[in-house]
Structures are given as structure tokens and as C-alpha cells.
Amino acid sequence: MPAKIDETITFECETGNYHTFCPISCVSWLYQKIEDSFFLVVGTKTCGYFLQNALGVMIFAEPRYAMAELEEGDISAHLNDYGELKTLCIRIKKDRDPSVIIWIGTCTTEIIKMDLEGMAPKLEYEIGVPILVARANGLDYAFTQGEDTVLAVMAHRCPEQEFPVGESEKTRTKTNLFPFPLLKEKKLVEYANHPPLVLFGSLPSNLVSQLNTELRRQFIKVSGWLPAQRYADLPSLGGGVYVCGVNPFLSRTATTLIRRKKCELIVAPFPIGPDGTRAWIEKICPVFGIETQSLEEREERIWESLKDYLDLVRGKSVFFMGDNLLEISLARFLIRCGMIVYEIGIPYMDKRYQAAELALLKDTCIRMCIPIPRIVEKPDNSNQIRRMRELQPDLAITGMAHANPLGARGIGTKWSVEFTFAQIHGFANARDVLELVTRPLRRNENLDNLDRTTLVRNTNEFYTSTPTPR
């Protein structure tokens, strides 16, 4: 009789620091997403050096972000912070004419208690351009949480949702349908008459279109996204507006939407992998009284298209060291693909916001008949390396600092930052996730084959070249 599998999730918390990329790197994707924005990072030369080198901006490009570098005098004596920032913002307005300027506070501004929030409203009034202040320092936030702080601040600037007189979200009929044209399929499709739905999380435009289309297939209309492509197009928020996240690192934004804007949060798994995308849609539809249609068949078709990758990863083991807060979702998807996950390290864990994702992780492990991996919040890297020496995983998903040392010890590695910048959401992009995962596995397998071929060739040459003893 098979041993009973432990069906409880084990959470641990160690004392390690955030061994992650600096959160000010969120500028690299947010300035591209919000097309009429300008990001001003307030920090030291070290921050500027990081942005210049780590983001890999081409020499001919003109990115819409800049550094306000603090000198020694600024740090020690607070000489003229307001005047300097005013000069920079006036120049930004003249050169770029942005619809919004976003100040990104770094570790230095946090340590010297620089009053960015106090200066911004006055300067906003003087120059006539909205100025938002987001704290994205590495003392308090992990890599991807930089986006979380920006979206939480931006949520405060969203307009209030207005319902027609005498109508509220509770009096709306959820079953009535009204038509809209779907040009690609050349037929009339209908939306359900449901309360507004706003999705939050910064995704490229093509991914936004894909997820909008997936919900449209279920007759659900997305009223807007936070952030929008243009600052002027921020979605309306308020009581009666439902919101749902697409990334697991946006817990502060979710809290702001609930408490400050009085929105209704749909707690759902995140649309990463076919299983996660299906579960994400299945959590949204019942809220509006809509039954899902053809989701099972769509998911099965995606799994069928992934067979070549599934054959490569099935039975392989993976260890998450923790970096970008995507670890729970990625681990759940890889377990569903047949991989063995030894440990899920994660810098920060909000169990309320990720409740549905944790439940799906548990269900996936039970379905695949494997133990639920333990989750280690704020892991100590020294302890993790000792555990990896014992477990010898086939793959470690880790930050860039540990990739080469682990590779030298015979463990295949993948940079976790690559999953942050790759397009991994929705049904159509599950293949891209597995492409990233299998690349080091395929490389190691090719090297092993090369070593065996070389050994055989050298052995054959030895026997053919050695004189036969008399």
C-alpha cells in the first residue's frame, strides 16, 4: 500500500537578506509600458551605474528615465533638494513633455529620510505636471516589488467610478448580453452586462490583448488595466468595481485597491501556465454569474502542444532559491509538468493575496501524487547551498550572483530574472516558460553526450594506436 502523502503546506522563515536584483530596475519595463511617463530615480552614483549597466539600454536609445544623483553634500546636509529637483523636472517637462513624472526613491533617500512626498505636491502645482512618489528601495522591497510600489501610488490617481443615477453594481443584471464585433472571427460576439472589471499588473501590449481575448471568449469585458498605456487612460475605480491581479508580487497594490479605493478583489491563481490560466478564468467567471465554456478543451490542446518539452522535464528536479516572487506560480506549473520541486525559496510571502495560488499548488501536488514542497520565506543562501549539496537538483532557478558558482559545482542554473522579463502569461506562452527551463537541461545533456562520444573516440584511438603485445 503506497505511503500517504503529506497534504499540508509547510512554511518556514529564515533570516537571510533579500538576495535579489535592486527594485529600481522596475523602471526598465514600466517606462515602456506607460508611454507618456518619465521616471526620475533619486539616488547615488551607484544607482545610476546599476541602471546604466544592468538594464542594457542601447547607446542610440532615448529611454524616458534619468538619475537625480545625490552628492556627498546633499546626503550630509540636505543642501537644496527642492531647488535641484525643480530644475530637473522643469528640464524634463521642456524636453520630453510627459503626462506624469514618477520619482523613484532609493535606499539613500530612505536612510537620510528625504521628504520626497512633501516636496512633490508643491512642485506638481508649480510646474503643472502630476508627480508621483514611489519608494523602491532595496532595504524594504525585493526585485519585482518596485512595480508594486509604483502601481499602489498610481491607484490613488485613478478617477472614481460613476454609476448612472439609480443604478449600482448590485442592481445590474448579470445575464443580459449586448453585442460587440469580433473582427478576427468575423462574427458578432456578446458581452455579459456585468460590473466593471479592472486587471492590475504591467504586461506588454500583446499579452494584455491575449488575456482580454481569453476573457472575451467567456463574455467578460475588461474595463481597464492598471497601469494603462497612457496616464490619461487610467481606469475608473471605486465601490462596485472588481479587480484581479496577474502577478503574485502586487500585494501592496491589491491592499490599496481594497482599502483606499473600496474595490472588490477577486482572489485567483495567476495566469502562468495552462493550468494557472484556466484557474484564473474559472475564478473570475463565477463572480459575474457566468459559466465557463470550452476551457477544459483549450487547456488540453495546450498540454498536447507541449509534449516535446514535457518529455524533457518529466522526472527532473528543480530548486528555487528565491528572487522575483514568481516562485510559487512557476513551481506549481513545473510540478504539473512532471518535475520534482525540492524547495521554493521566496523573498516575501503574502499568504492572503496568494491564497488561491497556494491552494492550486496543493491541489496540483495531490493530483501528481508528490509531496508538497516546503516554502522558505527570506531564505538564507548559505543554508540553501548546503541543502542543494545534499539534494543535488538537476536545475536551480536563482539570482545571477549564484548562477556561476552553482554551475561550477555541476548544478544546472537558470537566472530567475529571465522569467521576469519573458512573456510567460496566458495559454499561448506556456511554451516560452518551458523553453527557458529546458535550455540548461538540454545544454547539460548535450555536454554529457559530447563527453561520452569523446571518451569512446579516445578509447578507440588508444586501442588502434597501441602496438599489440607479442
Image: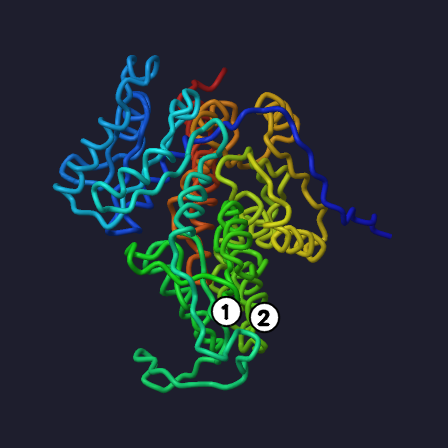
Q: Residues within 10 Å of mark 2 (few under 14, many from 20)?
A: some
Q: Are marks 2 and 1 in contact (CB under 8 Å)?
A: no
Question: Would you place residue 219 above or below residue 349 in this image?
Answer: below
Q: What mark, if any, has residue 453 been given in the picture?
A: none
Q: Is residue 31 visible?
A: yes
Question: Would you place residue 83 above or below residue 10 in this image?
Answer: above
Mark 2, residue position: 287
Check disc 2 and report its element: helix, strand or loop: helix
Q: Is residue 303 visible?
A: no
Q: Nearer the viewer, residue 254 or 81?
A: 81
x then y, percent, for residue 349: 60, 40
Q: Nearer the viewer, residue 67 or 421?
A: 67
In the image, is 100 to the left or to the right of 431? left
x then y, percent, for residue 404: 44, 25
Q: Nearer the viewer, residue 231 or 271?
A: 231
Check disc 1 and report its element: helix, strand or loop: helix
Q: Residue at x 53, y 80 (%)?
A: 172
| Residue farthest to the right, as pictured | 1
Q: Amino acid at mark 1?
A: Arg
x then y, percent, for residue 154: 39, 49
x then y, percent, for residue 120: 32, 37
Q: What mark, if any, has residue 301 been given in the picture?
A: 1
